[in-house]
Image: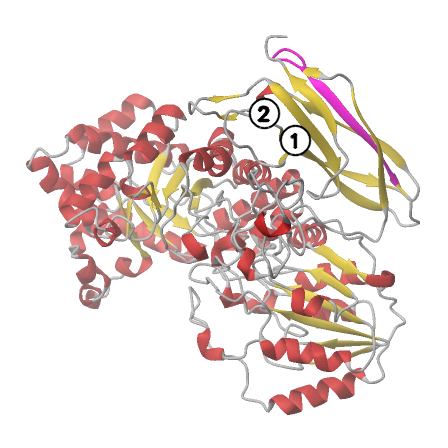
């Protein structure tokens, strides 16, 4: 490790060109010895071959062998032997793929997510990765947006808890074994594009932005995040990558973040497309003035920073400060001592997909799946039942989601494989293809190829009917295509494809119980299918152990416990929808006006189909005796609120107990309800427990009418229950002076 003085000496030994190189990120393709590369990526970036070996970092080079070779070749040709950093999108696992982040939110279990991130870090580090572009702390309320799959949902508190846990799991102290640096994204407000359309403008009031969208990012920063990535969107008309108020005044000055910042893919150059920069020179100036340290995959920094200094438009000090931050991160990673760090081909073989990691992946599946319907207790299934497993996901191994670049499909356990561990009385048929039109799918990352055979849809349906005729129960494995979500996966229609709905309707005519297993990366509008099934289990994209984990739940080895981290709309017309909406002067209930002149839809309900925090269990839990140990909260005291929870069933299970508060009146309009805490508890059959939460003054703070982050004296309500749809409440007062 170098000390501070040594880093400064190294910094000042670099030429300006070498300094600028540390602020440039390229990809794997440019590190080829093939001169033809000059006609490809390098030519497009207007970068000279010699400048490649001044580059500070590269993106998405996967595998220890490749990382070691590129780093070795780089150091041989580098003047000052400053190692490169290798960065990658390790979103929900490396080789062992876990459920997507939205599913992780459904666990309401930060400790489990910390363990998961630690496994991801271990698998990525032995493959040579130094930095992951994760966690995603974007608050998401619009199911139309494809990247909701990368978030933990619609609630600031839950998202913040999960983001902090993820950072800690990757590793805060980078000197420890098998750690990688975390890069928080997308800073900030990326999860609120207008109409849910990818890369669209964001329009938020400053109060909503600060109160709702910023807290989760702050939790990740406070947890020890090492890097921050600027987002593609605008805030108050200014793109994040050129937003000095956001990236400098807030992030660095107010929040005291001293780590490295990086622009998202080509975001510096896109300042021109946004219309706030007339050319690359101005784009580079805006970004460096906003304290963006690394330019990802454009020529703006490499070609323009030197010109900006020569023209006295920026200072050398600005460059030095940015380079020093990059060098410090490399030093914290131990790259000056060992440029290859944990990269090891033999370790890859030992660590990747080891049984310990697979067991944890299976557990995350257990806790992330959400039971949405279970009429007459049809689930769990009896292994002696004759089961027809039907649908495009019955045998599919495409269960990882769109960001699983480092994984292999053949490692995934399918539903068929999982079910066969419990029963041989299983008939399987595809029933239909995944999509009405295969042409709507455009590849991302691994360049999707149409793998679905050209088959007669009538033959698929007929096969499904024949396989289901003698079944006791039909299990339908339905859902989105895995390429319908993720970056670039915005949808105007978030219902199931017609071809799958038709399959369900056909199976319904057989007059047998129907269980739907749903695979998707976003909340779907399920109103048109809900009545046609007896049970519905939300499985998300569950990853490598998907088939095993889901089978454990379906056959009752494990009791479902997941809760929705994001509301499922009754209809897409409700989007964006969230439980913590602001109070209105004409609410549907408790309004003095006639029904027509209240805040409502005339053709659909106001409420979602399934609300935030909702999820069933094979157990039945009863909540009663809501109590509080005082009625006045001050700055110096804590109120304890408790409730008795009893498992009144014969099945043991976990319950996620949720605490919400409401600020009845404030200097500005406040949300009708806000999540302030949650606890996962286990109750044996007929066991009773008292669950207690603490309410502190700091939990009630918000940006008031003067834009000061504070709490206000007044009346409050507290709720404890099984979801955000709560009615039982207890009142207390906040009186800060005591």
Q: Quadrant of residue 197?
A: bottom left
Q: Position of residue 179 (x, y in %)?
A: 50, 40
Q: Which mark is residue 661?
A: 1
Q: Is residue 413 visible?
A: no
Q: Quadrant of residue 496?
A: bottom right
Circle 2 Cα neighbour tier, 10 Å, few/some/many (<14 / 14–19 / ≥20): some
Q: Nearer the viewer, residue 678 or 27?
A: 678
Residue annotated with mark 2: 700
Q: Is residue 431 left or right of residue 599?
A: right
Q: Is residue 480 left or right of residue 58?
A: right
Q: Position of residue 416 (x, y in %)?
A: 72, 72
User: In the figure, 707 relative to 231: above or below?
Assistant: above
Identify the colour scheme used.
secondary structure
Q: Nearer the viewer, residue 41 or 75?
A: 41
Q: Is residue 4 left or right of residue 124?
A: left
Q: CA distance from mark 2 to mark 1?
A: 8 Å
Q: Quarter of the image for the C terminus: give it.
A: top right
Mark 1 lies on a secondary structure that is strand
Q: Is residue 730 magenta?
A: no
Q: Nearer the viewer, residue 598 or 18?
A: 598
Mark 2 lies on a secondary structure that is helix
Does the magenta stretch mainly form a helix, a strand or a loop?
strand
Q: Magenta segment range? A: 633-646
Q: Is residue 609 visible?
A: yes
Identify which residue is drawn at 39% across, 28% down: 257
Q: Nearer the viewer, residue 588 or 142?
A: 588
Q: Quarter of the image for the N terminus: give it.
A: top left
Identify which residue is drawn at 58% across, 89% down: 455
């Amino acid at each position: 490790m170098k000390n501070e003085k040594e880093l400064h000496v190294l910094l000042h030994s670099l030429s300006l060109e070498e300094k600028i190189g540390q602020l440039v990120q390229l990809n794997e393709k440019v590190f080829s010895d093939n001169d033809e590369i000059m006609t490809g990526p390098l030519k497009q970036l207007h970068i000279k071959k010699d400048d490649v070996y001044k580059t500070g970092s590269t993106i998405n080079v996967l595998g220890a062998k490749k990382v070691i070779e590129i780093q070795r070749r780089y150091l041989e040709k580098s003047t000052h032997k400053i190692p490169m950093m290798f960065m990658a999108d390790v979103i929900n696992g490396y080789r062992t793929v876990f459920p997507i982040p939205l599913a992780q939110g459904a666990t309401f279990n930060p400790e489990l997510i910390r363990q998961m991130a630690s496994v991801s870090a271990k698998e990525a580090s032995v493959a040579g990765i130094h930095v992951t572009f994760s966690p995603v702390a974007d608050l998401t309320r619009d199911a139309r947006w494809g990247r909701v799959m990368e978030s933990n949902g619609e609630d600031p508190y839950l998202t913040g808890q999960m983001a902090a846990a993820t950072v800690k799991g990757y590793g805060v102290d980078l000197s420890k074994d098998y750690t990688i640096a975390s890069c928080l994204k997308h800073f900030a407000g990326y999860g609120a594009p207008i109409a849910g359309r990818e890369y669209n403008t964001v329009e938020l009031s400053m109060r909503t932005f600060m109160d709702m969208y910023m807290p989760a990012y702050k939790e990740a920063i406070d947890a020890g995040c090492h890097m921050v990535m600027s987002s593609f969107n605008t805030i108050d008309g200014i793109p994040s990558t050129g937003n000095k108020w956001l990236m400098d005044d807030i992030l660095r000055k107010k929040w005291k973040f001293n780590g490295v910042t990086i622009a998202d893919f080509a975001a510096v150059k896109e300042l021109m497309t946004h219309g706030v920069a007339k050319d690359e020179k101005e784009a580079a100036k805006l970004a460096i003035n906003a304290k963006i340290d690394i330019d990802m995959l454009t020529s703006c920094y490499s070609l323009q920073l030197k010109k900006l200094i020569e023209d006295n438009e920026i200072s050398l000090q600005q460059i030095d400060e940015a380079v020093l931050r990059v060098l410090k991160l490399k030093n914290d990673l131990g790259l000056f001592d060992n440029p290859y760090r944990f990269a090891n081909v033999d370790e890859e073989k030992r660590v990747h997909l080891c049984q310990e990691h697979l067991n944890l992946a299976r557990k995350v599946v257990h806790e992330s799946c959400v039971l949405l319907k279970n009429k007459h207790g049809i689930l769990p299934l009896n292994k002696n039942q004759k089961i027809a497993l039907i649908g495009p996901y019955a045998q599919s191994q495409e269960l990882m989601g769109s960001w699983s670049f480092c994984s292999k499909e053949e490692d995934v356990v399918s539903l068929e494989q999982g079910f066969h561990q419990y029963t041989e009385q299983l008939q399987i048929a595809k029933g239909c293809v995944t999509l009405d039109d295969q042409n709507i799918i455009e590849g991302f990352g691994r360049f999707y190829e149409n793998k679905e055979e050209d088959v007669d849809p009538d033959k698929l349906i007929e096969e499904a009917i024949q396989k289901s005729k003698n079944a006791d129960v039909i299990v339908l494995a339905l859902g989105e295509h895995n390429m319908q979500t993720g970056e670039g996966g915005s949808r105007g229609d978030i219902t199931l494809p017609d071809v799958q709905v038709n399959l369900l309707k056909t199976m319904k005519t057989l007059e047998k119980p129907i269980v739907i297993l749903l695979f998707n990366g976003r909340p779907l509008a399920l109103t048109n299918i809900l009545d046609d099934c007896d049970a519905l289990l939300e499985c998300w994209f569950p990853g490598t152990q998907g088939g095993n984990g889901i089978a454990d739940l379906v056959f009752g080895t494990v009791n479902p416990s997941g809760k929705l981290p994001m509301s499922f709309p009754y209809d897409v017309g409700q989007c964006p929808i969230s439980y913590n909406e602001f109070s209105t002067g004409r609410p549907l209930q408790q309004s003095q006006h006639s029904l027509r002149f209240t805040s409502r839809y005339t053709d659909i309900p106001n409420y979602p189909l399934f609300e935030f925090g909702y999820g069933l269990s094979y157990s039945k839990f009863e909540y009663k005796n809501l109590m509080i140990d005082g009625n006045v909260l001050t700055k110096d005291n804590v109120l304890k609120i408790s409730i008795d929870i009893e498992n009144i069933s014969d099945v043991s299970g976990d319950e996620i107990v949720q605490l919400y508060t409401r600020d009845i009146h404030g200097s500005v309009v406040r949300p009708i309800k806000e999540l302030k805490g949650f606890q996962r508890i286990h109750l044996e059959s007929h066991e009773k427990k008292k669950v207690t939460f603490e309410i502190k003054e700091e939990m009630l703070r918000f940006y008031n009418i003067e834009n000061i982050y504070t709490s206000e004296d007044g009346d409050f309500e507290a709720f404890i229950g099984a979801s955000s749809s709560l009615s039982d409440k207890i009142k207390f007062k906040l009186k800060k002076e005591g």
